[in-house]
Image (cartoon, rainbow, N blue to C red):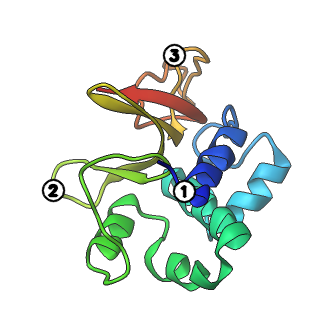
Amino acid sequence: MSTPLQNYIVERAKAYLGKTEIIENLGFHDPVFEVRIRTTGWLPPEPWCAALLKLLYTESITALDPQALPLIHKYFNLSAVETYNNCANSPEYHVTHTPDIGYAVIWEEGSGPSGHAGTVIGLIPGGFISIEGNTSDVNHPAHDANGNLITDPREGYIVAQHTHL
């Protein structure tokens, strides 16, 4: 059973589906979305998957549980891996490897600081569905600055939905 906060996070994530960047993380085609994501501290040309996660949680907590907002500012930042580590080492958050609706999901690449972030919007047998920023979308192909097709879901240009099994 999902909580109102979990459901609100999912609603906010779905509202941003399809938002696209100016390739190479230079800004966004939707100026309202750009203003909102910049409130997280994001600036071009930085990756923005963790900024979207921080934005979703900030908007949702502000609407439904504003007294918890200082925790978002304390633990969420513009690095997916640092956000994970901050939450894992905090007394306020419980980190789990079991996805649930509205939960943040963090992927780490190797053992370094590089990672990717998304939000769980649905559960399916053996996996989950997420919405991720700064990702790719096979239904909306794009090309990088050199004209190469972007196919890696961790290197992208759009807010898109993905299924993970």
Where residue 59 appears, as percent x and y from the top left, is 69, 64
Is disc 1 surrounded by few (<14), some (14 to 19) or many (20+) residues within 10 Å? few
Name the residue at 66% across, 35% down.
17
Name the residue at 70% across, 49% down.
27
Looking at the image, residue 46 sits to the left or right of residue 59; the answer is left
**Image quadrant assignment for residue 104:** bottom left
Seen from the viewer's position, the closer of residues 147 and 149 is: 149
Looking at the image, residue 128 sits to the left or right of residue 46; the answer is left
Up/down of 79 relative to 149, above or below: below
Across the whole image, how many numbered discs are drawn on residues?
Answer: 3
Query: Where does label 1 land, which residue?
Result: 3
Compare marks 2 and 1 and give the one earlier in the sequence: 1
User: Is residue 88 among what the camera can see?
Assistant: yes
Q: Residue 111 carries which label?
A: 2
Compare marks 3 and 1 and give the one earlier in the sequence: 1
Is disc 2 surrounded by few (<14), some (14 to 19) or many (20+) residues within 10 Å? few
Where residue 67 appears, as percent x and y from the top left, is 63, 85
Q: Please, what secondary structure does the residue beneath circle 2 have?
A: loop
User: Which amino acid type is shown beneath numbered disc 1?
Assistant: Thr
Where residue 161 appears, as percent x and y from the top left, is 53, 30
**Image quadrant assignment for residue 111:** bottom left
Q: Please, what secondary structure does the residue beneath circle 1 have?
A: loop
User: Which amino acid type is shown beneath numbered disc 2?
Assistant: Ser
Up/down of 60 relative to 125, above or below: below
Q: Kindly report the distance in space between the C-alpha atoms of the residues bearing marks 3 and 1.
A: 32 Å
Query: Where does label 3 land, which residue?
Result: 138
